[in-house]
Image (cartoon, helix red, strand yellow):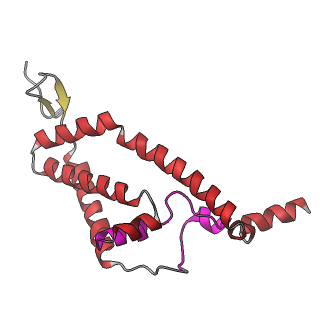
């Protein structure tokens, strides 16, 4: 059976003999370049540790951090080798950074047409349900972190624009 490569890029895996789609080289180049920019920025950027401007709409509205708040600081600390500080900024920063490094390496293999490691990484990622695990992890982390912050320091929410709006609506 002959496969027309102009219609679809397909390859037969050696182990299973099953026809599978080849990973997209364009997507791999985009991921490789984007993640390279993230890693270089993480190495070069030195964000302030306290009292900084944030683009996070959730934090600006509620005064509380969203599950992703602190990731930039965490990545910058990791790029400089400070794992403790990275976990302090966002507990899920180190595992996410590691997952992005693995994705970056996978993208390099796709660009170089070395598909055996790509298939191995895809199988591992599929078994571990990496995306689902991070989604659940960030949801749980966000709820626990917000609950802890409200219990330990309710003034962070009390002084927020959302609390002021709620107070005006109740009066």
Q: Is residue 66 magenta?
A: yes
In what quadrant of the picture does the C terminus appear?
bottom right
x and y, in percent, of residue 46 in the image: 37, 80
Occupied quadrant, residue 94: bottom left
Determine the residue positioned at 18% across, 38% down: 120
What is the span of residues highlighted in magenta in the rendered image? 52-81
Q: In the rendered image of this protein, does residue 142 appear above or below residue 126?
A: below
Q: How many marks?
A: 0
Q: In the rendered image of this protein, does residue 69 appear above or below residue 15?
A: below
x and y, in percent, of residue 47 in the image: 42, 79
In what quadrant of the picture does the N terminus appear?
top left
* 40 or 145: nearer the viewer: 145
Q: In the rendered image of this protein, does residue 78 appear above or below residue 52?
A: above
Determine the residue positioned at 42% across, 64% down: 87
Determine the residue positioned at 31% across, 52% down: 99
On screen, residue 78 versus residue 9, left or right, reads right
Determine the residue positioned at 19% across, 47% down: 25
x and y, in percent, of residue 160 in the image: 71, 69
Occupied quadrant, residue 119: top left
x and y, in percent, of residue 19 in the image: 16, 25
Q: In the rendered image of this protein, does residue 31 appear above or below residue 135?
A: below
Q: Residue furthest right?
A: 171
Q: Is residue 55 magenta?
A: yes
């Amino acid at each position: 059976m002959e496969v027309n490569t102009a219609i679809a890029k397909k390859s037969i895996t050696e182990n299973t003999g099953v026809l599978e789609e080849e990973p997209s080289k364009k997507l791999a180049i985009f991921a490789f370049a984007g993640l390279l920019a993230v890693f270089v920025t993480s190495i070069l950027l030195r964000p302030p540790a306290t009292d900084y401007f944030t683009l996070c709409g959730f934090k600006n509205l509620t005064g509380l951090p969203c599950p992703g708040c602190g990731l930039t600081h965490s990545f910058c600390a990791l790029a400089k080798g400070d794992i403790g500080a990275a976990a302090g900024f966002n507990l899920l920063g180190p595992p996410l950074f590691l997952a992005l490094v693995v994705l970056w390496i996978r993208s390099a293999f796709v660009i170089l047409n070395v598909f055996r490691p790509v298939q191995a990484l895809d199988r591992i990622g599929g078994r571990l349900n990496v995306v689902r695990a991070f989604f659940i992890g960030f949801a749980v982390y966000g709820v626990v972190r917000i609950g802890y912050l409200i219990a330990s320091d309710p003034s962070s929410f009390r002084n927020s624009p959302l609390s002021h709006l709620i107070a005006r609506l109740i009066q």
